[in-house]
Amino acid sequence: LIKGFEVLKDLPGETTDKHRIGLWVNTGLMADVLRSLERGAEGVGLYRSEVPFLLRERFPSEEEQRAIYREQLEAFAPRKVTMRTLDVGGDKSLSYFPIVEDNPFLGWRGIRVTLDHPEIFLVQVRAMLKANQGLNNLRIMLPMISSVTELEEALELLYRAHDELIEELGVELELPEIGVMIEVPAAVYQARDLAKRVSFLSVGSNDLTQYLLAVDRNNSRVASIFDPFHPAILQALQKVAEDAHAEGQQVSICGELAGNPLASPLLVAMGYDVLSMSASNLPKVKSVVRSLSYQQCQDLLQQAMQMDNSRDIRELLEQVLTDVG
Ligand code: PEP
Ligand code: MG
């Protein structure tokens, strides 16, 4: 395996007939960075900014955050690093900011928390913008958006932080590309409205599966129902890709599904521009992408989309992976 990923490291993520797809990574700790670079990551599609918050006993200051973000941005420059703003709540609770609720996954989480606490959001965004100075490889991504109103509120805060920093520092600061995570079913239906206002959409397939199928992503009793190959999920994924492209924006996917080689042919055929995954899955996904033609992927997608259950879809895809070895 070691040999495998060393050989693959510098080869592009493309089909046999040269249809290109970005193979990026998800990070949180500095430890993820080395593994990612060793495997030839072309960018970071999801930096989970809550990770350093979870490792502390209080909110990190603006300067502490700036230093942490700078490390990530520097390690990958000039490759893009997509930093997601704080996504706490749900299953991720900070000891110094406890959130106790009956239904945490339907409660105060992600952008809902930071819009109610703009001071937390503004400090984080300021730290990101400062860290990006001179590098300009930052992208900012907003989690758990469920309406255009939330997006507009968040954008207003972002622009405000940007204007204030320019004023304070007396320098020009690039406004990074901003994107929205599509992980709430409502956002799937409003993908075009959201895409009109930002530069990219990125599907969070973990939460999207949880919310579309009404199945707790962490409950082992219902783990077999948590199935991202459910036809309803695939239809949602296809719609998001089409809608992002209809608005001329990039579309990526950064949930676990992006790192599942079974899904690769379908995601390629749907037109995803970027698959962002844990570094450990990158070599396998790359070798699958490199062993199929774009036409094969499209034929598979067409067949899969005619099936009404995930068992048949998985069987079809498993057969293909067996055939390509
Ligand atoms: C997701 O929901 O798919 C996602 C990538 O975000 P997280 O797993 O951090 O909720
Ligand atoms: Mg999520």
Image (tube, grey):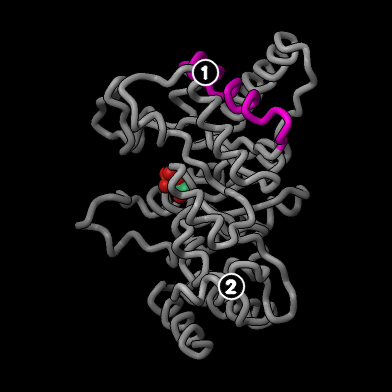
Q: Is residue 265 visible?
A: no
Q: Looking at the picture, which amino acid does disc 1 mark?
A: Glu
Is residue 241 left or right of 213 when viewed as pictured?
Answer: right
Q: For mark 2, what is the residue? A: 8
The disc label shown at residue 62, or none: 1
Is residue 233 left or right of 219 when viewed as pictured?
Answer: right
Chain part drawn in magenta: 117-136
Identity of the residue drawn at 67% across and 48% down: 79
Instruction: Give x and y (percent) for residue 90.
Output: 34, 36
Q: Which quadrant would the N terminus be assigned to in this image?
A: bottom left
Q: What kind of element bears circle 1?
A: helix
Camera-side residue of 292 and 304:
292
Residue 31 colored in magenta in the image: no
Is residue 92 left or right of 110 when viewed as pictured?
Answer: left
Q: Residues within 10 Å of mark 1 (few under 14, many from 20)?
A: some
Q: Looking at the picture, which amino acid does disc 2 mark?
A: Leu
Identity of the residue drawn at 48% across and 46% down: 27
